[in-house]
Image (spheres, rainbow, N blue to C red):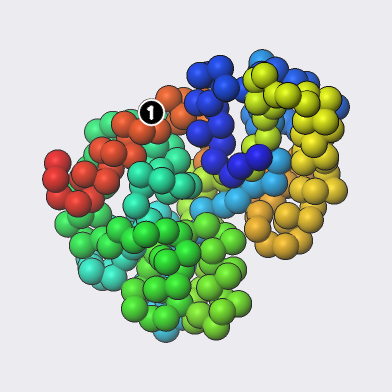
Amino acid sequence: WGNEIFRTINLAEAGVLTPYESPTAADIPARFKDPAHRWAGSAMRARMMALKASADDAQQARAMRFEGLTDPMFKGQIAMALPTAGTTGGHVAALYVLWGDAKATRFFRALHDNDIKLLGGNSVVADQVGQGNLALGVTDNDDAEAAARAGGSLRTFLPDQDTFGTLVVPCTVGLVSGAKHPDAAKKLVDYLLSPAVERRLIEARFARCSVRAGGADAIKTMDVDYRAVARVLDVAANKATALMQGRQ
């Protein structure tokens, strides 16, 4: 049970997970589960933009799109988590798949030129924006919610709702190969994939929307093949990090 679908896909390809077709996954769209039934996705986290509350109208207009991070008006005031771990790695890899190598490389180099800060995690990004230390950052919906509950002064929104959409990252469940108690493990998988558990994760504001009908349909999501993203994950994350740090 994890929230990094790309790592789960790679674990399945490495033989760590074994096929199991859970009955509670029957209504989950094919996009969010493995054709070989080695994993399935549930409640989805969404990539968000966090903008300082004091931002003016021009800053907000630019921040509505992910590429607004390269605008000189934000120079030295932008941040994301290090891409070598967590959902940020999946996000940068998804951009390589969506845009192709040339455009993605130009983008991450432009972020270096705009003096982006690479921080220790999505929660740190949200906190820094909420405290007014930075103007704009990329984070996850749950980290943005946590920063706001902690008293942070920030606005959050889903980017690129008028262009290519934002990346959504399903939580994933899979059965480990060679499990000592497979019957009990299957019952746990069934429970974790159930609509009731998914609903509780959304109500707790850990996840942003459901994988089931009417969930992700309510927002514009990035249309990428999760398997293609998983294949380039490590290379893309390392390359994007080097570009943003000025090492490449």
Q: Which residue is mark 1?
A: 232
The residue sitting at 42% across, 66% down in the picture is 124
- Residue extending furthest toward the front: 180
* Element class at badge 1: helix
Residue 78 located left or right of residue 182: left
The percent position of residue 195, horizontal first and vertical second, equals 83, 44
Which of the two residues, 32 or 65, is positioned nearer the viewer here?
A: 32
Q: Is residue 108 above or below residue 73?
A: above
Identify residue type, mark 1.
Val
Q: Is residue 132 above or below residue 191?
A: below
Residue 133 located left or right of residue 225: left
Residue 222 seen from this side? yes
Q: Residues within 10 Å of mark 1 (few under 14, many from 20)?
A: some
Residue 38 seen from this side? no
Count how many numbered circles sit on residues in the image. Answer: 1
The residue sitting at 28% across, 70% down in the picture is 77
Q: Which image quadrant: the C terminus?
A: top left
The residue sitting at 78% across, 26% down in the picture is 181
Which of the two residues, 222 or 50, is positioned nearer the viewer here?
A: 50
Q: Is residue 241 above or below residue 121?
A: above
The percent position of residue 162, horizontal first and vertical second, equals 51, 52
Location of residue 60 (image quadrant): bottom left
Q: Which image quadrant: the N terminus?
A: top right
The residue sitting at 80% across, 36% down in the picture is 188
The percent position of residue 107, horizontal first and vertical second, equals 27, 46
